[in-house]
Image (spheres, rainbow, N blue to C red):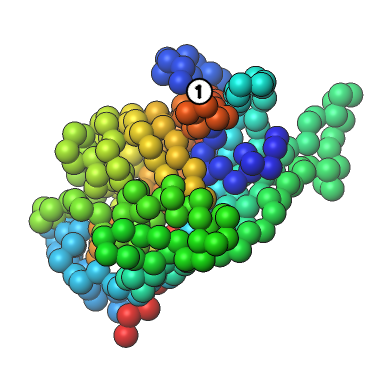
Amino acid sequence: MNLRLLAIPLLALAPVSCEKVKSLAAKATSAVKAGGKARESAQVDAKLQALVDQTAEGAVFRMDLPFPVRLEVRTTNRHEISGRTYQSSAIEKRTDGVKGTQLAISKLESDGNKVRYTLEKSSFIIPTPDPPDGGKKKKTEESVEQVAPSVPPVTFHRSGKSWQAENRSDFRAAVLSKQLAPVFDQLLVENALAPRPMWFGKRRFKAGDQLVVTGDTLPMLLAGTPKGTLTLKLESFDAVEGHPCGVFSITGDYSRKQVPDFEGRIIDEEVTIQAGKIWCSLLYPIILRRELETIQTTRSGGQGGLVERGQGSIKVTETRVWKSLDP
């Protein structure tokens, strides 16, 4: 496992057939089915709960409230990965098996015209192989953690309709500015710094209601230009760090091209969600938590440089602590 892979939020997965990948992942059983074991209901912030539009007929997923300008969003991503990676360039080809848990914690601060991105932690935990004699692992040898080097925060500012990284004399900032400027608005939506352009409408939802999301409605769940079909079922109402949400089970398949992240990586992805849950805010068009059991194929790079591909299964747990700093 090289350090470059440690910070990748999704395993670089190869463009193989969906059926082949599904058969690969079907051999493994996950500890989390249909979004995992039931979580204890979280306490809802009373001030936020007062803004919820809910009656005996159900709840409306609001998008009429003014979206906050000043925000702080801390995201914790945990990905349990099992699969293979493929790297190729003009001088070499390489194939590696990948099994372990990737953890990334990042913080975003926005005031509407500036966004500051800080990667607070990035690590990959590799399980220790079973002893050859069938003996028990020692507690101190259960895993090996590889920690990616720390990097300084990067601040982006709005210039007209585009976004640029500040301090572009710094090489990393200059590269990020060039790569992310065309897709920065997509990053804002995907990371809950801007409202999703489409949401659940004025319909009231109650537990048990189902919704098929496909075609032009996919941007309510996925930024960019996704294709595919996802099926949602409202399971319950809960909270994420006090923020009231509706909890949906989710299954289906989708694909996207040119998906960016704040580290400057751009990938193409094909994803099958075998089982999972998402926590959708009842107040704003944002998603605050995901627990997904997935099979993924992705590709990054090209244009004469290093190409990374791979295939495998990834169990995703993503949680956002979303705070409005508006007065």
Q: As displayed, is residue 157 above or below residue 209?
A: below
Left or right side of 39 for 101: right
The structure residue drawn at horizontal position 84% and vertical position 48%, both measured from the top left corner, is: 140
Image quadrant containing the C terminus: bottom left
Which residue position is annotated with label 1? 14
Nearest to the observer: residue 163 or residue 108: 163
Q: Is residue 183 above or below residue 88?
A: below
As drawn, the residue found furthest toward the bottom would be 327
Tell me where residue 29 appears, x and y as whole percent. 55, 28
Locate the N terminus and report the quarter of the image it occupies. top right
Q: Secondary structure at mark 1?
A: loop
Q: Amino acid at mark 1?
A: Ala
Q: Quadrant of residue 120?
A: bottom right
* 327 vs 34, nearest the viewer: 327
Residue drawn at x 32%, y 71% as measured from the top left: 112
The residue positioned 34% from the left and 70% from the top of the image is 113
- Residue 253: x and y in percent read 33, 29
Whole-percent x and y of residue 300? 49, 32
Residue 75 in the image, given as x and y percentages of width and height = 48, 58
Q: Is residue 176 visible?
A: yes
Q: Is residue 233 visible?
A: no
In the image, is 220 to the left or to the right of 277? left
